Image (cartoon, rainbow, N blue to C red):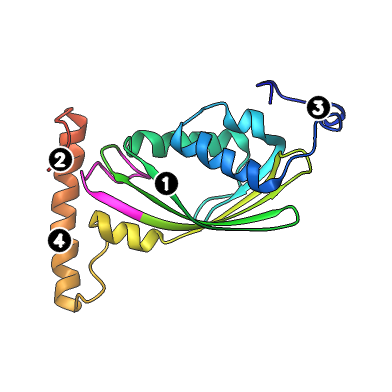
Amino acid sequence: MTGTKTSAADRTALPRRDPREAALELLERGWRVKDPTVLDEMAVPECTYDLPGHPRMGNKEFMELMQHVWLAKPDLRIELLDMVVEGDLVASRVRFSGTQSGELLGIPPTGRFVTIDEILLERWDEHGRLLEFHQEADFLGMLGQLGVVPPKDAGPLGQLAHAVSSAVRFTWLKRKARRGGGRPR
């Protein structure tokens, strides 16, 4: 890819590309290398992104979300667990892991290492340009690892105790982050 946006007419002149190769490049450049130009170069301008808990996004909004995650987890790692390709559709099961040392979706830095498994469904055109992106993820499990929700086995009193201690802890973490107090313990 040249690094410039291509028009619909220009895309017809692009060589054919295997969707598996394109999906692997997106994982590499988007999450391992953290390349801010990856969507400009690999996605059609009208590409859509559907993620749980978010309104449908375009390239700009999804790149902003990617950059938010990069900042929240600077040591982010991604592991490809499975990939299945059927025509222009690529289904991947991936595992993201990293230490939450920055604000993540409104949650102040906790300093905790978290792992989240995700299913990604991507539709690609014949030239290796992303058309659609869908994600399903275990966000509840991630929230548990961050201490935002109580453990699964907490009874009613355990849930209440968790709510009170979490409110105190998150207030302290927010204050510490505002003062630039560094990474929480």
Quadrant position of residue 89: bottom right
**Contact? badges 3 and 1 (CB < 8 Å):** no
Residue under numbered circle 3: 7
Depth check, mark 3 against mark 4: the one in front is 3
Depth check, mark 2 against mark 1: the one in front is 1
Residue under numbered circle 1: 78
* Dot 4 or dot 1, earlier in sequence: 1
Residue 15 appears left or right of 19? right
* Dot 4 or dot 2, earlier in sequence: 4
User: How far apart are labels 4 and 1 at the CA level?
Assistant: 34 Å
Residue under numbered circle 4: 164
User: How far apart are labels 3 and 2 at the CA level?
Assistant: 47 Å
Q: Give residue 9's position: percent from left, percent from top.
A: 87, 28
Q: In the figure, 54 relative to 175: above or below?
A: below
Looking at the rendering, in which quadrant would you find the C terminus? top left
User: How far apart are labels 4 and 2 at the CA level?
Assistant: 19 Å
**Contact? badges 4 and 2 (CB < 8 Å):** no
| Label 3 SS | loop
Q: Nearer the viewer, residue 100 or 89?
A: 89
| Label 4 SS | helix
Quadrant position of residue 140: bottom left
Give the main secondary structure of the magenta stretch: loop
Amino acid type at mark 1: Ile
Amino acid type at mark 4: Val
* Dot 3 or dot 1, earlier in sequence: 3
Q: Give residue 53's position: percent from left, percent from top.
A: 49, 55
* Dot 3 or dot 4, earlier in sequence: 3
Residue under numbered circle 2: 184
